[in-house]
Amino acid sequence: MRDAVIQTHNLTKKYGSFTALENANMTVYQGDIYGLIGRNGAGKTTAMKILTGLTDQTSGDYEIFGKKSKEAAPIRNRVGCLIENPAFFENMTAYQNLRYYCYQKGIADIRKIDEVLSFVGLEEAKGKKFKTFSLGMKQRLGIAFAILDNPDLVVLDEPINGLDPIGIAELRDTFHMLSRERGMTLMISSHILSELYALANRFLIIDNGRVLKELSKEELDNECSRATVLHVSDVKGTAVLLEQNYGIRNFKVIDNTEIRVYDEHLERARINRSLVQNNIDVSAIYETGITLEEYFKKVIEEEGR
Amino acid sequence: MINMIRAEKYRLTKTKGFYIFWGLILLIIGLDLATNSIGTIGLGIGIDEMVTYSKDIMFVMGNFNFYFLLLMPIFSIIIGEFTDRIVKNTISSATSKGRYFIYKYVICVGYGLLVFLVVNIGFYGLYIIIRPNNPRADFGLFLTRVMSQVPVILMLLSVFVMAAFLMRKGAAYNSVMILLPFLFEVILGICMNIPGLKNIDVLLKIVKYELSTVMYNLGGGIDPGAGYFRNVMIGCFAITVISFVIGYRSFKKREL
């Protein structure tokens, strides 16, 4: 079992009568790339702000590296963040801005600055003032700042906003590398579902301040991917037949009457015939499958009811 | 703390404001020494009475100038980080809100006091060099007068830090803090011109404890009596503590 880096317990944040986050429970394990999926105003940034100490929760609690919220201040230096828009001193260059934070965080090895700037592809622009940066460059500098002192946990709020497609692809590789080679745990929010899907291994779907679902990539694949749904009178017999006669193991028993087979090349007519020949009644066979966007909409609609 | 001071020093020296600030100070000192006369902003003080003192003591008596001068470093150190919400970077990955306030408070107060002492002592040194034949006070006496003003400067810095954390916007901070003494002077002037109000006790006390008058009296060693110095010290201490507590508590609760 991997160690939990972040664990929240009924985390709630209210602004007057407005509830930005309601009883949110989530667990981020070491090495995860944890994606927060939600519409604008869903509560993603609020959750991140609470976890990074920018705002206090109204009720509930969280643990970060095993420390409860009130004791978390000393371990903040293990966390790198980029919350909302990247903000730096406008009249200072990229290098000077990072140098300032090196002093602040007590980073003696200033070669780290060149290293992270090159990591995010800003080595050429290190002498340019922040105010001259494009949105994409600002995002990159924000990411460079977040990984400056090689933190164990990186929290990035909408880091791919404003980036061009090549930039997004490069950053995706960067995030994977940070996770794989440096063992960093990443928490990333985005409303660009396809990108988050390509990045993360675990997901939290959030809407109107409520956590709707926390699931792994495999679970998400199972929920979204195309499947042949079989409604049969004997699921056990069907499972045995699929395995023994057709060598199919990629299926899931949903309930007493439903099996889902995740095999793109399934010969439905042959399966149907075999089931009937084995005295298993087939009341329906059909194909199902939804895109990530459709699944997201479905979850929101289901929970909204 | 050391890291924060080093970071702040690095950043301050990269800003134009830092050089403008020191340039302005040099201009004031330069003009005073070149013209052999002391220029100051005083709301309740009698400039005519100052001429009976030596120029170095007059400079100390006119230290109300620091009200306006010290607004600038507080602006650079605190407001600069609230602009575009840069402060989030530090709070989310380096320290807590409470500690951040204390760090900034210590840096502002430390830097402000350093500026105050360096400028005054610097003036004394330059005065000796440029005007060696002019009458001047003994350095011990000069330093005593300067040091007697330190609690007032400390109070001012504490109020400025509180105001910066409460207002967080450059325009609000500058307009309120710069206009405050003028507003005070206008209201006081109006009250003093209303027959019947001129001699009431409270008004006279306000004039006596008004900031430029306090600096003038402390700088010149003028004691208007009735425990004046004691009252000034107690008032400064109380305002310093209250402004620290208000600033700290409000920032701790602030959403970023």
Image (cartoon, coloured by chain):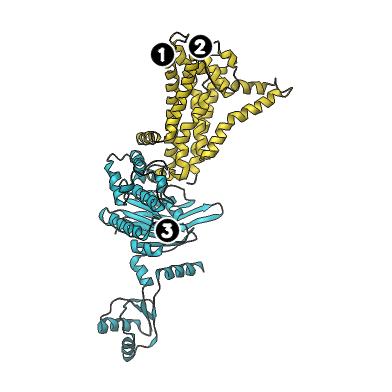
Residue visible at 69% across and 21% down in the picture? B200
- In this view, the residue in front, B227 or B157, is B157
> Few, some or many C-alpha atoms within 10 Å of disc 2 (few <14, some 14-19, many ≥20)?
some
* Residue B38 horizontal/vertical position (percent): 52, 17
* Residue A245 horizontal/vertical position (percent): 26, 84
The residue furthest front is B34
**Residue type highlighted by circle 3:** Asn
In this figure, which residue is indicated by the disc labeled 1?
Answer: B129
* Residue A132 horizontal/vertical position (percent): 41, 46
Which secondary structure, mark 3?
loop
**Residue type highlighted by circle 1:** Ile
Which secondary structure, mark 2?
loop
> Few, some or many C-alpha atoms within 10 Å of disc 3 (few <14, some 14-19, many ≥20)?
many
Q: Chain A: what color?
A: cyan
- Could you say which disc has been placed on residue A25 in the image? 3
Where is B133 relative to A37, above or below? above
**Subunit of label 2:** B
